[in-house]
Amino acid sequence: MTLTGKQKRYLRKLAHDLKPVFQVGKLGVTEEFNEQISDYFNSHELLKISILQNCPYDKKEVAEKIASGTNSHLVQIIGSIIVLYKENKEEKTIQLP
């Protein structure tokens, strides 16, 4: 499943008031980091991640690694913030248009 433009706009609107829950620093994206995010997706469908200034990797590269490592969808990269979405099959709270 890929997200349409309309769905991404809707998710960006929902993510606007969220605070970043995770931060990517100098270690970049590790397997443990992806496992923590996957655990977070068990109870939430939308997530903001902040990329710190000491992260040596490109923000697009970081976003793609996290999205592929957690089987989630990249909604947006704005500044140093990444927004990800992963549908929760059991407890779905977000109804996409």
Image: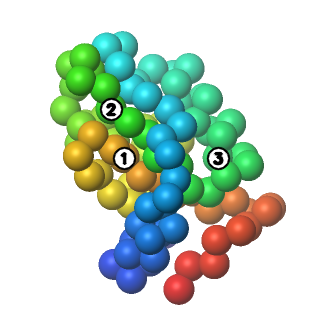
Residue hosting label 1: 82
Mark positioned earlier in the residue sequence (1 or 2): 2
Mark positioned earlier in the residue sequence (1 or 3): 3
Q: Is residue 18 left or right of residue 63?
A: right
Q: Which residue does the image show at 27% across and 40% down from the upper left? A: 80
Cβ–Cβ under 8 Å for marks 1 and 2: yes
Mark 2 neighbour density, 10 Å: few (under 14) some (14–19) many (20 or more): many
Using the image, tell me which numbered label, if any, was put on residue 41. 3
- Disc 3 and disc 2: Cα gap in Å? 19 Å
Identify the element where label 3 is drawn.
helix
Residue hosting label 2: 51
Amino acid type of the residue that numbered disc 1 sits on in the rendered structure:
Ile
Amino acid type of the residue that numbered disc 2 sits on in the rendered structure:
Ile
Identify the element where label 1 is drawn.
strand
Asked if 8 appears above or below 22 in the picture, the reply is below
Residue 34 position, x and y percent, is 53, 30
Amino acid type of the residue that numbered disc 3 sits on in the rendered structure:
Phe
